[in-house]
Image (cartoon, helix red, strand yellow):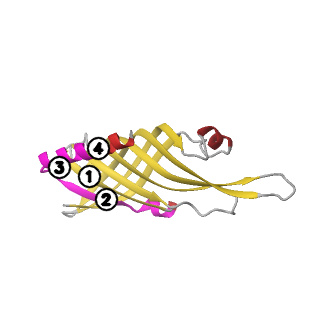
Amino acid sequence: MSTLLKALFVLVFGLISVKSKAQQELHFNVSNVIFYEINGDFELGIKDYLSVSAFGSYVFGLPVKDEYDPYKKYSYLGAELRLYPGEKPNMSGFFLGVYGKYSFGDVYTTLYTNTGNNTVQQQVWAFNKTSIGITMGSKWLVKDHFSIGFLLGAGRFVSINYAEPGTVEKAEFFGLDQNLYDFRAGLMVGWRF
C-alpha cells in the first residue's frame, strides 16, 4: 500500500505543477527545532485561495533521562490541501487544511528480566503509521518574498504497524502506542518564488 500512496503522491503533485503557474513557497518550521525535529514543506498555489503542500520531517528524539527510557527516531512525509477563505489574495491570511501523513522509523526500548543475573536487553521496534487530520493557521507575506505563519493541526492514526520482533500488542503492553492521535504545530518562516 505504501508504494501506491507514493505513486499517487508523485502523480498528483506532478500534474498540479504542470498545470499551475501560481505562487510557490518553501517553508521551514523554526519552532519544532526545540523539540528535536527538523521540518519543512513546499506549498504550491492552485488558485489564489487554494493550495497543495508536501511536507516532511526527521525527528531525532528528545534526550532520554536514562538508558531504560524508550525513545523514537523517525521521519514522516505528507500532503495537505489548504483553503484560504479570507479576503486577502495570493495564499495569505487564515487557512484551513486537511492532511495525510505517513510516519516510519524505530522505537528503542529496554526490556528487563527478573532472573538472578538481571538481564537487560535493548530492543528496536521498526514501525510505520498512517494518519489523517485537519489543520488551521495563518500566514502573512512580508515584503515581496518572505513569509511568516503558524499552524495547528490534529488527526488520528488510521494504521499502526510494527515489524518483528515487536507486534502491536507487545508495543501497547510496553506503553509505546498509548497515543492514537497525531498533532502538528509550528511557527513557519518561508520564501515565496
Residue at the spot of label 1? 43
Q: Amino acid at mark 3?
A: Ser
Residue 89 visible here:
no
* Quadrant in which the C terminus is drawn: bottom left
Answer few, some or many: residues within 10 Å of disc 1's Cα (few below 14, many 20 plus, some between 14 and 19): many
Q: CA distance from mark 4 to mark 3?
A: 15 Å
Task: Kindly identify the residue that appears in the image at 48 percent across and 37 percent down.
Answer: 159
Is the C-beta separation of discs 2 and 3 under 8 Å?
Answer: no
Is the C-beta separation of discs 1 and 4 under 8 Å?
Answer: no
Is the C-beta separation of discs 2 and 4 under 8 Å?
Answer: no
Q: Please provide percent x and percent y for residue 39.
A: 40, 58
Residue at the spot of label 4? 7
Answer few, some or many: residues within 10 Å of disc 4's Cα (few below 14, many 20 plus, some between 14 and 19): few
| Above or below 28: residue 87 | above
Which region is colored magenta?
9-34
Q: Please provide percent x and percent y for residue 164.
A: 58, 46
Task: Kindly identify the residue that appears in the image at 62 percent across and 43 percent down.
Answer: 171
Residue at the spot of label 2? 27
